[in-house]
Amino acid sequence: MIKGWTTGTDPATHIKAVQAVLDAGATPFMHFPSVIRPQRSSSTGPKCCQSCAER
């Protein structure tokens, strides 16, 4: 599943991969996995993290 994904800890590898996608005309979108999950509330809508939920 991750065969075509850019992985690793070297920032230059990721910058090169993102630049190639942008040069191809893609709309910028970044996803950073997190252990924090959105909290949903029917009265206030989704919250992205505990910090937002406390606002």
Image (spheres, rainbow, N blue to C red):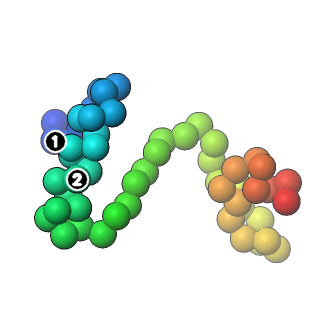
Tell me the kind of residue under disc 2: Gln
In the image: residue 50, left or right of residue 31: right
Residue at image position (31%, 27%) is: 10
Q: Residues within 10 Å of mark 2 (few under 14, many from 20)?
A: few
Query: Residue, x 28% and y 43% (percent of image)?
Result: 15
Q: Circle 1 — which element? A: loop
In which quadrant is the N terminus drawn? top left
Q: Which mark is residue 4?
A: 1
Mark 2 lies on residue: 19
For residue 4, which quarter of the picture?
top left
Of marks 1 and 2, the one in the foreground: 2
Mark carried by residue 32 = none
Taking the image as shown, residue 42 lies to the left or right of residue 26, namely: right
Marks 1/2: CA–CA distance: 16 Å
Q: Work out which residue is located at the far right of the displayed protein and give it.
A: 54
Q: Quarter-wise, where is residue 9 in the image?
A: top left
Position of residue 18 measured from the top left corner of the image (x, y, whole percent): 26, 51
- The one nearer the camera, 25 or 48, is 25
Residue 2 visible, this angle: no
Name which quarter of the figure residue 36 lies in: top right
Q: Residue furthest bottom?
A: 43
Quadrant (top left, top right, bottom left, bottom right) of the C terminus: bottom right
Query: Which residue occupies 85% across, 54% down?
Result: 54
Q: Earlier in the sequence, mark 1 or mark 2?
A: 1
Query: In the image, 44: left or right of 23?
Result: right
| Image position, residue 32 (x, y; %) | 46, 45
x, y percent for residue 23: 17, 62
Residue flagged by tag 1: what amino acid is it?
Gly
Tell me whether circle 1 and circle 2 mark residues in contact (CB < 8 Å).
Answer: no
Q: Secondary structure at mark 2?
A: helix
